[in-house]
């Protein structure tokens, strides 16, 4: 059964999910961000079937998450590298990893990797940051408001939420 398309929805999350495609994409972004860009490495690290990997890599190239780069001329061999768009998607994977670590999504009781500051060795976490000052803001202070692309449904939805006293 093919999943319902989110194309045409005025929601950035739905649009992002439409571009990402499926769960394999984030595992491939994970491995590409770790420096694994060759087909055989990606296949071995993820366990993804060959046909699925070929289709997902084609999708990632078409949607400009990754680019193919020739690393050997004879015989011709390419590797995949994250584009700026793909590097931005890495943040989504990091958020999922943090959530999975916090809620023991693997069931193994402890994270297999940690993100740390290269200079201090201290753990790092994603944060909501004030775009002007660079200061981290607690989630309790975060609020959604209509953006420049908002339509009447967006205003109605946010007004309902505000009217409910949340």
Image (cartoon, helix red, strand yellow):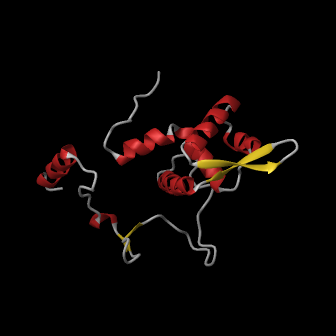
Q: Is residue 85 left or right of residue 28?
A: left
Rendered position, 132 above or below 2: below
Work out which quarter of the rendered image holds the C terminus and state it.
bottom left
x and y percentages locating residue 129 in the rendered image:
39, 69
x and y percentages locating residue 35 in the rendered image:
70, 56
Q: Is residue 91 left or right of residue 146?
A: right
At x 57%, y 41%, the residue is 62
Res. 49 in view = yes
Q: Is residue 135 left or right of residue 66?
A: left
Task: Identify the image quadrant of residue 76.
Answer: top right
Of the pair 142 and 148, the residue shown nearer to us: 148
Task: Identify the image quadrant of residue 133.
Answer: bottom left
At x 14%, y 56%, the residue is 165
Of the pair 28 and 105, the residue shown nearer to us: 28
Rendered position, 164 above or below 20: below
Rendered position, 153 above or below 116: above
Q: Is residue 17 left or right of residue 38?
A: left
Of the pair 12 and 125, the residue shown nearer to us: 12
Of all residues shown, which one is farthest toward the top? Answer: 1
x and y percentages locating residue 124 in the rendered image:
53, 68
Of all residues shown, which one is farthest toward the left? Answer: 163
Of all residues shown, which one is farthest toward the front? Answer: 73
Res. 107 in view = no
At x 40%, y 31%, the residue is 5
Of the pair 67 and 108, the residue shown nearer to us: 67
């Amino acid at each position: 059964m093919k999943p319902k398309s989110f194309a045409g929805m005025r929601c950035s999350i739905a649009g992002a999910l439409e571009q990402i495609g499926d769960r394999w994409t984030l595992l491939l972004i994970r491995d590409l961000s770790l420096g694994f860009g060759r087909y055989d490495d990606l296949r071995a690290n993820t366990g993804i079937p060959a046909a699925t990997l070929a289709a997902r890599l084609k999708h990632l190239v078409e949607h400009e998450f990754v680019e193919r780069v020739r690393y050997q001329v004879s015989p011709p061999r390419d590797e995949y590298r994250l584009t700026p768009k793909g590097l931005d998607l890495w943040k989504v994977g990091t958020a999922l990893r943090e959530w999975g670590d916090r809620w023991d999504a693997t069931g193994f009781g402890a994270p297999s990797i940690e993100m740390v500051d290269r200079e201090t060795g201290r753990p790092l976490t994603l944060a909501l940051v004030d775009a002007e000052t660079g200061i981290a803001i607690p989630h309790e202070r975060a609020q959604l408001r209509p953006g420049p692309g908002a339509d009447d449904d967006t205003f109605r939805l946010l007004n309902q939420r505000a009217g409910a006293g949340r």
